[in-house]
Amino acid sequence: TTLVFPSCVALCFPQHLTKPLLAVAFLASFGSSMLYGYNLAVVNSPAKYIKDFYNETLLESHGLTPDGHLLTVLYSLTVSIFAIGGMTGALLVGRLVTKYGRKGTLVRSTALVFMGGALMGFSRWCRIPEMVIIGRFITGVHSGISLSVVPMYLGEIAPKNLRGFLGLVPSIHICLGVFIAQVLGLSEILGKEEHWPLLLSLVAVPTMVQLILLPWFPESPRYLLIERGDVHATIAALKWFRTKGNIQAEVEEMQEEQRSLSSMQTLSVCSLLMDSCVRWQVLTVAVVNIGMQLSGIDAIWFYTNDIFRNAGIADPYIQYTTVGTGAIEVISGMLGCFTIERLGRRPLMIGGFLFMGLCCAGITVSVLFQLSYMRYISVGCVIGIIAGFCIGPAGVPFLITAELFKQSHRPAAYTVAGCLNWMSNFTIGFVFPFLEIATGPFCYLIFCVVCLGVAVYTFFIIPETKNKTFLEISQMFATKNEICEEELYPNSELKMALMNGYGTLDFHNKK
């Protein structure tokens, strides 16, 4: 797969997808986005062993014998604390990317993975259950940072005709991370009681690869020019990622955006929320990110084995059924990645959420009617939810967060999107076991309503952003936000001069 996939990519996009651009997309996603997917699913297989570990250590340390309810709470905390860490990381994104840049933030954040992995890896040996929870929290902080920074970085280094494709590369790696966690969690590999700490701590391996190789790649050209004003570094970065013929037009487009922002600093979260010029963009980011998590996909990932068990699948076959769903995720993610530049963002979002909604309703029906063949319908619906999610909703929300905002608004937008995303992730991870107990199979109808609602919102509100520049996308929202052209281009009296055939900033008042 590693050899065939890049070859297929090169055939699909022979003109603009250079090897360095493809390499940095895979490397940034491999050491960051893949860990997010891995951490989502890795606690599913060893759930029983983790609960047993908590039971044993509580008895040893405090003389307590916890009941099933307390163990459920502790395990739910172990699952959902990852999301609390993610929300913490998301709050830091705006400041980090402004100070250290996109690539610089990714490189520096790798230290968190090594800390979290070490805590989880040595927890059983030290007989300290808190190390598992703290380790999950720290790796969550890393995922909260990288889940926003990777799409931002790739969105800024990509030419506009490849922005959708590169924007979904992280979503493929999220699916790949889930699949790897499911495979390694098989009882024949690391799904044994003595191996679960190793299973949790393997996150350090891809991060080590990223730490060694990523510093050799350039920083985001848009960051270098628009925020740092370093024209020569921008040109050097573009030469690294592009063929020479594309450089001048891109520098000019960046300079045009910089001129429109020359009197504006990078916005804080509060300023973003108060800015009426991006009212509908902020609302859109909120809807798609909350909908992405409340669609039920995290409940599927966190509690796959329990869902299949409730559907009547025999225990010996559950782990293999789960691995099969992981393979479907990877295939669906690749399908979405290769079709987004042909179909656009809207069809993948609308189709993905609609299909997920129908499958959520299908799970409810299949569980209510416990007939022999219904278990297969239930499994099919779980696979359908995962496939629908990975084709579009898994990656498009992060992509359009970059596309809907100009450079000054983008860090704050990712902070807002990340916080909402992780808050919803925590809510599902912690509440779902109790929601399922309280409502039974009807809990999936809640997910169904959310999915259908996001699909309707996307159809009526979100425009197609394929092959549009960031400024063109801002113009598309101008009517909804009731702003005029002068507000979009407050410095339109400025003009640009070219230097050395590439372009640099030279401000002159129009006569």
Image (spheres, rainbow, N blue to C red):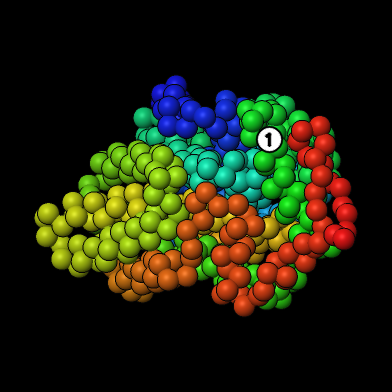
Query: What percent of the width, then of the height, locates residue 9?
Result: 45, 30
Q: What residue sits 80% from the left and 53% below the top? A: 495
Looking at this rendering, what residue extends furthest in the front direction? 511
Q: What residue sits 59% from the left and 55% below the top? A: 403
Quadrant in which residue 373 is drawn = bottom left
Quadrant in which residue 90 is drawn = bottom right
* Vertical side of 35 occupied by 494: above or below: below
Left or right, 437 with respect to 27, comes to left
Q: What residue sits 59% from the left and 41% below the top? A: 159
Query: What percent of the width, then of the height, locates residue 112?
Result: 70, 43
Whether residue 313 is visible to the viewer of this picture, yes or no, is yes
Look at the image and tell me in which quarter the C terminus lies: bottom right
Of residues 456 and 317, the one drawn nearer to the viewer in this rendering = 456
Of residues 352 and 264, the one drawn nearer to the viewer in this rendering = 264
Quadrant in which residue 347 is drawn = bottom left
Query: What percent of the width, then of the height, locates residue 362?
Result: 23, 63
- Disc count in the image? 1
User: Could you say whether the residue bearing mark 1 is in a helix, strand or loop?
Assistant: helix
Whether residue 65 is visible to the viewer of this picture, yes or no, is no
Looking at this rendering, what residue extends furthest in the top direction? 3
How busy is the neighbourhood of tag 1: few (under 14 within 10 Å), some, or many (20 plus)? many
Look at the image and tell me in which quarter the N terminus lies: top left
Looking at this rendering, what residue extends furthest in the left direction? 372
Q: Determine which residue is flagged by label 1.
A: 247
Query: What percent of the width, then of the height, locates residue 399?
Result: 55, 52
Of residues 502 and 285, the one drawn nearer to the viewer in this rendering = 502
* Vertical side of 100 occupied by 272: above or below: below
Amino acid, disc 1: Ile
Q: What residue sits 28% from the left and 42% below the top? A: 321
